[in-house]
Image (tube, rainbow, N blue to C red):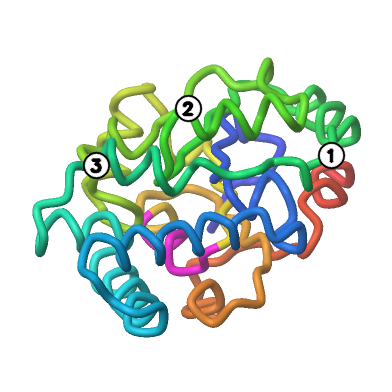
Amino acid sequence: MQPPLSEIDTWIFDLDNTLYPATTNVFEQVNRHIASFIQELLSLEEEPARQLQRRYFKEYGSSLRGLMVNHGVEPNAYLNHVHAIDLGALEPAPRLDQALGRLPGRKLIFTSASTKHARRVTDRLGVSGHFEAIYDIHAADYRPKPHRETYENMVATFEVEPTRAAFFEDIARNLEPAADMGMTTVWVKNDSPFAREGSDGTHIHHTTDDLIDWLERL
């Protein structure tokens, strides 16, 4: 049985398509840059590159991990390329700022992106000041969600008590290790097929298609 939300004292948020709506299509820029990186690296046409991108994401949790394992890709070169995006579609989010400000306890970001990218996004949204820390792909030793050891390392690094933590994430399968550890999970609905995979599982305790509205109703 999950504890009541009133007992949560650590609020953990994924970044992309979670702190901002997937409908902004900001992350689609990242997807295009991943495909272009693979095209250039392996001299592939666009469609074969996207197929490999999707396969590595499914098999390894991220395209980066697959490229590192199979092609020896240097992660910083990859991350600098894929995160060189235009954030113009992101508007400041004063309602999110206020909702985060009302949450009691600590706020953390847990992302398979880089800290640099996370700070660009949160600065653009106007919510950076709420987050105590960012646990990024470098801190995870390039093992993305849903690798269980990455969750365990994140919890140990920030001395999080999982049974008093809530985790918000748009990719349903990434919530399973968090639930197994005792966290309360919130799936921020995303209509893409890979994000929906596993969304009917018991590891999802709450579901919303509007993060800000959900937080305001707490």
**Which mark, residue 217?**
none
Dot 3, how many residues are within 10 Å of its Cα: few (below 14), some (14-19), or many (20+)? Answer: some
| Residue shown at 76% from the left, 57% from the top | 24
Q: Identify the residue position indicated by label 1 in the image.
A: 91
Which residue, given by chain and number where applicable, does mark 2 sit on? 116
Q: What is the span of residues highlighted in magenta in the rendered image?
A: 171-177
Residue 150 located left or right of residue 47 = left
Which quadrant of the figure has residue 169?
A: bottom right
Judge by depth and name the residue closer to the eye, 109 or 23.
Answer: 23
Label 2 crowd (10 A; few <14 / some 14-19 / many >=20) = few
Q: Earlier in the sequence, mark 3 or mark 1?
A: 3
Residue 170 or 119: which is nearer the viewer?
Answer: 119
Q: Position of residue 82 (x, y in %)?
A: 44, 49
Q: What's under tag 2, amino acid-wise?
A: Lys
Point out residue 16 in the picture as x, y percentages from the top left corner.
58, 49
- Looking at the rendered structure, the secondary structure element under dot 2 is helix
Which residue position holds label 3?
75
Using the image, determine if residue 75 lies above or below residue 172. above
Q: CA distance from mark 1 to mark 2?
A: 19 Å
Asked which secondary structure carries label 1, the reply is loop
CA distance for labels 3 and 1: 29 Å
* Kind of residue at badge 3: Pro
Tell whether label 2 touches label 1 (CB within 8 Å).
Answer: no
In front here: 40 or 56? 40
